[in-house]
Image: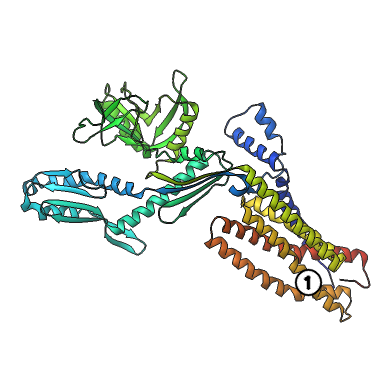
C-alpha cells in the first residue's frame, strides 16, 4: 500500500523548511549584507545610529548566512606574486656566520685569525683563515656545525655543504635544506598573506599556491588591486636595535657588527645601529591602533613574556641611551630610553595617519613575511563585469528552468507538476546548503547549478516511466506507484553515485573555478536525489490519500 508514515512526512518537510529558510537571505542580498557588516562593527565595540539602522534591516531571529560571490561575479583584485625564497637562504647564512666565527675562534691557536670575505654571492658564506696548517681542522669544525635535514623519509643529509680551497672555506646550503626551507617559506607566506587579508575583513579570498614559488591571491569586493599590494608589499620586519651613532651617509663605514639604516621620515638622516637586535617583531603578542599624549595616531604593542623580560633588562641597563625602532630596514623612530620599561609594553610613534597606523598594526599582528614578494601580475576586475555575469547566469537558469518545467508538465501532466514543485525546492535547497557552509559562488558554480537543473528531473523521469510500466500490469494505481519507486531506486542511486564521485574528485584535485563547479554539482546531486525520492513522493502520497483515484495517467 502506498503510504509514508507521519514522522517521515514531518522530517521531509522540516528539512525542506530549514533549507529554504537558510536560502531566503540570498533573495534580499543587499539588505542582509549591510546587516552583517553592521553587526561585525557593533560586535567589535563600535556603535552609532547609522550602524543600528543598518543592523535593523534584517531580523536577528532569521539566518543571515549568504552565498559569497566570487571574483568573477563581485569584482575585485587578482594578483600573482612570487616569493623570493633566495632572501631566506641569504638570511640563514647571515645568521650562521656568528656560529662559524665563535667555533673557529675557540681554536685560534691552531686555526689563526678568521675573517669573512664580503665579495662573494649572497648564497655563499666565505671564511678566510690565516693559518694554512689549521685549514683541515677548520673544515671539520664548520662541517660539525651542520644539522640533519628532517624530511618525510626521516633525517637526510646535513643542512650545509662546506668546501675547502686552500685557506678559504665556502659554506652553502645543501640541496635538501634548500628544498625544505623553500617549503617552510611558502607555507609561512601563505599563512601570513591569509592573516593579513582576513584582518581587513574581506569576504572569502582565494589564496593558493601556484607552482614552486608563486601564490595566487584573489580578493572579491576590493575596489583596486593597489589596496592589496600596499597590504602585502610590506615585509613588516620589525626590530629594536641599539643606536651607536649618526652616520653622514649610506656609504660611511659602520664598523664591525654594525649597519647603517636610513630614517623613514624622508630626511637624509642615517643611523649606525648594532646588527643584532635586542628583540624582533616575531616576539610581539599584540599590536593595535592607539594615540600618543599629543593625540597623534600611533601603534601600541606588547611583547610575549620572554621578550618582555629581555626588553626590560635592556632598558634598565641602558637608561639615557637611544635605541631604534626599525621597520623593513628603515628607522621609524629613535627615542632615548628615559626609564626602565617593565612589562614589555610600548608605543610606536611617527608621522602616521590613522589609516597608516591601522595598517601597520595589522601587519605587525599578522607577522613578518619571511621573504620579499614580487608582483608578477595584477588586475582589478570591475563589478560591472560581475553584474553582467550574474545577469547572464540568471537568464541561463530561468531559461533552463522554464524549459524543463514545460517539458515535465507536457510529458507527465499532474505528476509533472509534482516534479516541478520538487525542482523549485531543489534549487532553494542548493542555495541553502551553499549558505550554511559559506561557499563562494563563481561563474563555473552557476554552470553547475544550471547543469543540476537539467539533471534534477532525471530521477523523476526514471520513476514515472517505471510507474507507466507497472500500470500496464493492471495492479492498481497505488501498487503501481509503490513498485515504480522501489524498482527505480537502484538506478537512481547508481547514476547519481558515479556523478557524485566525479564531483568529489574535481573538488579534491581541482582548484579555483573547478572546485567551485564541483561544490555546486555535488550539492545539486544530493538535493536532487532527496527531492526526487522524498519530496515528489510525499506530494504524490498526499494527493493520492486525499483523492483516492481509481485510475491515474502518467
The image shows a total of numbered marks equal to 1
Colour scheme: rainbow
The N terminus - image quarter: bottom right
Identified at 10% across, 54% down, the residue is: 166
Please state the horizontal and vertical placement of residue 315, each as a whole percent of the image: 30, 27
Q: Quadrant of the C terminus?
A: bottom right
Residue 404 versus residue 62 in the image, above or below: below
Question: In the rendered view, does 172 fall on the left or right side of 552?
Answer: left
* Residue 5 x/y as whole percent: 81, 65
Which of these two is toward me, 99 or 446? 446
Q: Say which residue label 1 marks.
A: 463
The residue sitting at the bottom extreme is 473
Residue 30 image position (x, y, % from top left): 69, 40
Considering depth in this image, is 119 or 361 the residue closer to the camera?
119
Quick check: can you spot residue 90? yes
| Position above or below: 549 against 95 | below
Rendering coords of residue 418 (x, y %) = 83, 62
Q: Secondary structure at mark 1?
A: helix
How packed is label 1: few (under 14 Cα within 10 Å), some, or many (20 or more)? Answer: many
Above or below: residue 546 compared with residue 255? below
Give left or right: position of 372 versus 381: left
- Determine the residue located farthest toward the top in the rendered image: 294
Residue 5: tell me if it is visible. no
Q: Which quadrant of the structure image shows residue 444? A: bottom right
Amino acid at each position: 500500500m502506498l503510504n509514508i508514515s507521519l514522522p517521515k512526512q514531518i522530517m521531509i518537510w522540516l528539512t525542506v523548511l530549514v533549507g529554504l529558510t537558510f536560502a531566503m537571505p540570498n533573495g534580499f542580498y543587499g539588505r542582509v549584507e549591510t546587516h552583517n557588516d553592521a553587526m561585525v562593527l557593533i560586535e567589535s565595540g563600535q556603535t552609532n545610529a547609522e550602524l543600528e539602522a543598518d543592523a535593523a534591516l534584517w531580523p536577528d531571529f532569521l539566518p543571515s548566512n549568504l552565498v559569497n560571490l566570487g571574483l568573477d561575479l563581485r569584482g575585485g583584485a587578482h594578483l600573482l606574486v612570487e616569493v623570493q625564497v633566495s632572501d631566506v637562504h641569504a638570511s640563514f647564512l647571515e645568521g650562521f656566520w656568528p656560529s662559524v666565527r665563535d667555533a673557529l675562534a675557540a681554536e685560534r691557536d691552531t686555526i689563526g685569525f678568521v675573517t669573512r670575505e664580503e665579495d662573494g654571492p649572497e648564497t655563499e658564506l666565505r671564511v678566510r683563515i690565516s693559518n694554512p696548517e689549521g685549514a683541515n681542522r677548520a673544515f671539520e669544525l664548520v662541517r660539525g656545525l651542520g644539522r640533519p635535514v628532517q624530511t618525510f623519509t626521516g633525517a637526510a643529509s646535513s643542512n650545509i655543504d662546506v668546501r675547502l680551497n686552500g685557506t678559504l672555506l665556502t659554506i652553502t646550503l645543501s640541496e635538501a635544506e634548500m628544498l625544505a626551507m623553500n617549503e617552510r617559506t611558502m607555507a609561512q607566506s601563505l599563512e601570513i598573506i591569509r592573516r593579513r587579508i582576513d584582518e581587513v575583513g574581506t569576504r572569502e579570498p582565494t589564496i593558493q599556491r601556484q607552482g614552486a614559488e608563486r601564490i595566487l591571491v584573489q580578493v572579491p569586493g576590493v575596489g583596486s588591486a593597489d589596496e592589496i599590494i600596499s597590504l602585502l608589499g610590506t615585509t613588516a620586519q620589525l626590530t629594536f636595535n641599539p643606536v651607536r651613532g649618526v652616520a653622514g651617509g649610506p656609504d660611511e663605514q659602520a664598523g664591525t657588527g654594525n649597519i647603517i639604516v636610513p630614517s623613514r621620515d624622508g630626511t637624509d638622516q642615517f643611523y649606525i645601529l648594532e646588527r643584532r637586535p635586542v628583540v624582533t617583531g616575531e616576539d610581539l603578542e599584540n599590536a593595535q591602533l592607539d594615540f600618543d599624549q599629543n593625540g597623534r595616531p600611533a601603534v601600541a604593542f606588547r611583547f610575549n613574556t620572554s621578550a618582555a623580560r629581555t626588553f626590560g633588562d635592556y632598558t634598565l641597563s641602558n637608561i639615557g641611551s637611544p635605541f631604534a625602532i626599525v621597520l623593513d630596514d628603515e628607522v621609524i623612530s629613535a627615542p632615548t630610553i628615559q626609564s626602565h620599561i617593565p612589562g614589555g609594553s610600548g608605543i610606536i610613534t611617527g608621522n602616521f595617519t590613522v589609516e597608516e597606523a591601522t595598517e601597520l598594526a595589522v601587519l605587525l599582528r599578522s607577522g613578518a613575511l619571511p621573504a620579499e614578494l614580487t608582483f608578477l601580475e595584477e588586475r582589478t576586475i570591475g563589478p560591472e563585469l560581475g553584474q553582467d555575469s550574474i545577469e547572464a547566469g540568471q537568464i541561463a537558469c530561468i531559461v533552463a528552468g522554464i524549459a524543463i518545467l514545460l517539458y515535465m508538465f507536457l510529458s507527465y501532466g499532474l505528476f509533472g507538476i509534482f516534479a516541478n514543485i520538487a525542482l523549485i525546492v531543489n534549487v532553494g535547497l542548493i542555495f541553502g546548503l551553499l549558505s550554511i557552509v559559506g561557499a563562494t559562488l563563481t561563474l563555473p558554480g552557476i554552470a553547475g547549478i544550471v547543469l543540476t537543473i537539467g539533471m534534477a528531473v532525471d530521477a523523476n523521469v526514471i520513476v514515472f516511466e517505471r510507474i507507466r510500466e507497472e500500470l500496464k500490469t493492471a495492479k492498481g494505481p497505488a501498487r503501481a506507484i509503490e513498485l515504480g519507486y522501489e524498482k527505480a531506486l537502484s538506478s537512481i542511486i547508481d547514476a547519481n553515485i558515479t556523478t557524485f564521485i566525479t564531483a568529489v574528485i574535481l573538488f579534491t584535485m581541482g582548484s579555483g573555478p573547478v572546485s567551485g563547479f564541483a561544490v555546486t554539482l555535488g550539492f545539486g546531486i544530493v538535493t536532487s536525489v532527496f527531492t526526487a525520492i522524498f519530496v515528489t513522493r510525499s506530494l504524490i502520497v498526499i494527493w493520492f490519500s486525499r483523492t483516492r483515484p481509481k485510475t491515474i495517467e502518467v
